[in-house]
Image (cartoon, rainbow, N blue to C red):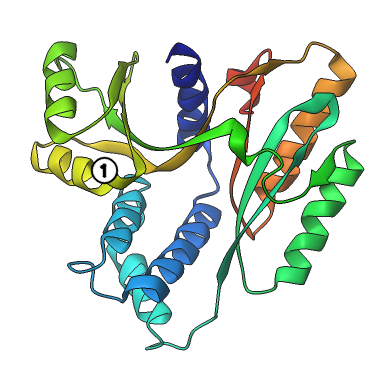
Amino acid sequence: MSGHSKWANIKHKKGKADAARGKIYTKIGREIAIAVKEGGSNPDSNSKLRDVIAKAKANNMPNDNITRSIKKAAGELGSINYEEINYEGYSAGGLAIMVECVTDNRNRTASEVRHFFDKYGGNLGATGSVGWMFDRKGLIVVDRKPGMDEDEMMMLALEAGASDMQPQEDCFEVYTEVGDFSTVREALEKDGCTFLSAELTRIPQNTTSVEDPETLDKINKLLEALDDMDDVQNVYHNGDLPEDEEDDD
């Protein structure tokens, strides 16, 4: 799991370092809209909404913003009809890339995603072309407070139903199967854990190394351009890129 942990920790550090809070809140607001559309506005009876609210709190999203997003999604403040769409393709150098989007305009989003793939030497593929290279998992990143014992955290995670736990310097990464994510997250919350992030993610089964500087530049520009799109929620790739920690992808 070491390669997975390295990849996941990079994503976690990127989230911590991202100063664009407004953009993060907007993206979480769209996730709330999707969750409410699927299961209603009451988090007590909507586990997906509870999960998104936990993610919002882990990102320090104010309660007022969360409540307003739920009311808007429920149509109380006027609503926008969002849908989830995933795009798959390859970057320059052949990295597999998954782009998760939430949009109110499918044509606009597809056009923008295709534009960036073309601009930076990649190519957009058909649905399913690279998705099989990633495992869908729950990932809960628990703040590692002074004195927290690794063995104790492992026991807490496994008793809650997690599939694995990986200790890092400043956190514990708790992995779950998709169907167990909500149960594990709620159990750890009751045990007093503080989350740095808690969400479903995609973990590459294998990673690909890229050394050529020109290719790396194209890859990083593509990842950055996609991540900056308003309609894009998450960008995943299977690259084992040099200096990845500093470049945030």
- Residue 145 position, x and y percent, is 20, 22
Quarter of the figure with residue 230: bottom right
The answer to which quarter of the image holds residue 36 is bottom left
Label 1 crowd (10 A; few <14 / some 14-19 / many >=20): some
Residue carrying label 1:
180
Q: Amino acid at mark 1?
A: Asp
Q: Position of residue 187 (x, y in %)?
A: 13, 41
Q: Is residue 225 above or below residue 95?
A: below
Q: Quadrant of residue 131?
A: top right
One can see residue 57 in this view = yes
Residue at (83%, 53%) from the top-left corner?
Answer: 114
Label 1 SS: helix
Picture layout, residue 171 above or below residue 229: above
Whether residue 69 can be seen here: no
Q: Residue at x 67, y 46 (%)?
A: 128
Q: Nearer the viewer, residue 61 or 102?
A: 102
Instruction: Give the answer, above or below, for where 79 lies relative to 161.
Output: below
Identify the residue at image location x=30%, y=54%. Answer: 51
Query: In this image, 108 relative to 202: left or right?
Result: right
Where, quadrant-wise, is the C terminus in this rendering? Answer: top right
Q: State the residue in front, 69 or 185.
A: 185
Residue 174 appears left or right of 227: left
Quadrant of image for the N terminus: top left
